[in-house]
Amino acid sequence: MPKHTEAVRGDRSVRGFELPVLLTPAGPGLASLVLLTSDLLAVACAWSLAVHGRLLAGGVLSPELYWRLWPGLVLFAVAYASTGLYPGFGVNPAEELRRTTVSTTLVHLTLGAATFILRGAEAYSRAVFLAAWLLAVAFVPLGRALVRELFGRARWWGCPVLVLGAGRTGEMVVRALQRRPGLGLKPVAFLDDDPAKPARVAGLPVVGGVDMAPRMAREAGIGYAIVAMPGVDRDRLLEIVDRYGRAFPHLLVIPDLFGLSSLWAAARDVDGVLALEVRQRLLLRGPRTVKRALDFAAALLVGLVAAPLVALIALAVKLDSPGPALFTQTRIGRGGRPFRAWKFRTMVRDAEHVLERYLRDHPELRREWERDQKLRHDPRITRVGRFLRRTSLDELPQLWNVLRGEMSLVGPRPIVQEEVPKYGPRFTLYAQVLPGITGLWQVSGRNDTSYEERVALDAYYVRNWSVWLDLYILARTVWVVLTGRGAY
């Protein structure tokens, strides 16, 4: 075990251990204030754009009449606070999107009903209310995402988290939280009864046994603890929860249920027995119908708007290198059925021969290719093709696959037959849904992720699907495309 020390950081005294990350005690309050400011600015901007947009469109209205509604901002603050969005640490982005959308919609409905009843329908423009609502639904989550991106790693952002259990599960939890600092749950130390555990795990110290938890909670002001000991026997787990649940206002228990739906699982009481209700929504007929309807409508709209761009790209591909503008490849779809996926051609002719010759000349890269089916510097890709891949514009023709019902806008990454063995037992889950143009893999690092991580992300998506998760992935896709993160 690491040698225990006494450390004093600022106004906080920590006896017996030294935390690697000390967060400002006022962090939750400051984070709540920043998020509240962002939310109110987003709503105010939405209304300002709606009013001035209506004026530019030739509408006859008095802006001063709408500025009198500013006390209504209090309703937005109350609605967001009542759904746990301040500070909202630990709330999944898809769930945050659902809460902000529902709250924003309800407040606009309330404001609309009140103003039209009390002041008369003729005084206000319905178009302004509708535009303000649509803009606010988009601006509020965008503002929150920007706040988390800017301040996620700040010293005052988040709450310290103590992890009970320094095994593989604890390490997985810590690394997941470290990858997403914007969530605000910042692990600072491990506790574990096994003296054989290393002094540091995932960059954090293992400072002692789990019996130190109450003292750490008291002296370091730690309000969150995660029990990551799925292999411990039932009686010991109950003892830990009962004993240390009183020391931490927030105690999260990681169950031994890896692989089940986690995003939308709900706790249920069955006559005093804890149960988890798990619904894989994407495997139900109703949600599938909704998803298909949204896919068709969105693909048709985007396809019509992007038609001139498609023509320009096709011309650029033809001028850049000899060969057709479009390329098809057989991919595996729902039910394991093959289909032809359309893309803009991004490779030279005789691409397979070029690849084999390149790997023969660079044998050190063969292992990378066999592991990920990707090369960071692929000799087959053309100049225009490199740009299309970086921006994901090469996948625009797959809108045709979406209209035909062979693909979805969001879903698992479409794979070829040779990749099926790599999915192992998870292929059965993959084959139950339509592959997507974009998905969790594309917004979680793309080519910077390992193949095993890609498979896990596909399985996670199928088990946790909802409209909100799709909307979150689509929004993240725009950001990833603009930044080019993980693309090559």
Image (cartoon, helix red, strand yellow):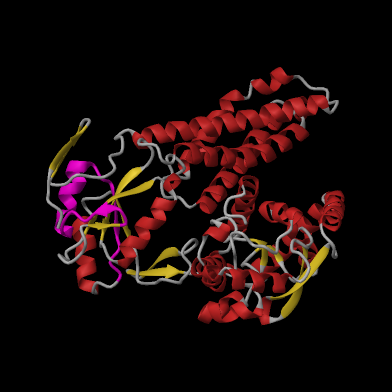
Q: Give percent across and percent down for residue 122.
A: 79, 27
Q: Residue at x 39, y 38 (%)?
A: 157
Q: Give percent across and percent down for residue 28.
A: 36, 37
Q: Left or right: where does residue 102 sit relative to residue 54? A: left
Nearest the viewer among 176 and 422 is 422
Q: Magenta residues?
A: 202-230
Q: Residue at x 77, y 28 (%)?
A: 53
Q: Residue at x 30, y 63 (%)?
A: 228
In the displayed structure, 222 sits above or below 265; it is above
- Please check the rendered image and state whether residue 479 is part of the magenta-colored stretch, yes or no: no
Residue located farthest toward the front when viewing the structure as drawn:
361
Examine the image and state in which quarter residue 131 appears.
Answer: top right
Nearest the viewer among 476 and 369 is 369
Nearest the viewer among 399 and 134 is 399
In the displayed structure, 57 sits above or below 21; it is above
Q: Give percent across and percent down for residue 33.
A: 44, 31
Examine the image and state in which quarter residue 487 appears.
Answer: bottom right
Q: Residue at x 52, y 52 (%)?
A: 95
Q: Quadrant of the N terminus?
A: bottom left
The answer to whether residue 385 is seen in the rendering is yes
- Please check the rendered image and state whether residue 222 is part of the magenta-colored stretch, yes or no: yes
In the displayed structure, 164 sits above or below 370; it is above
Q: Left or right: where does residue 469 sit relative to residue 258? A: right
Q: Give percent across and percent down for residue 317.
A: 82, 56
The answer to whether residue 285 is seen in the rendering is no
In the displayed structure, 39 sits above or below 313; it is above
Q: Left or right: where does residue 243 sit relative to residue 354? A: left
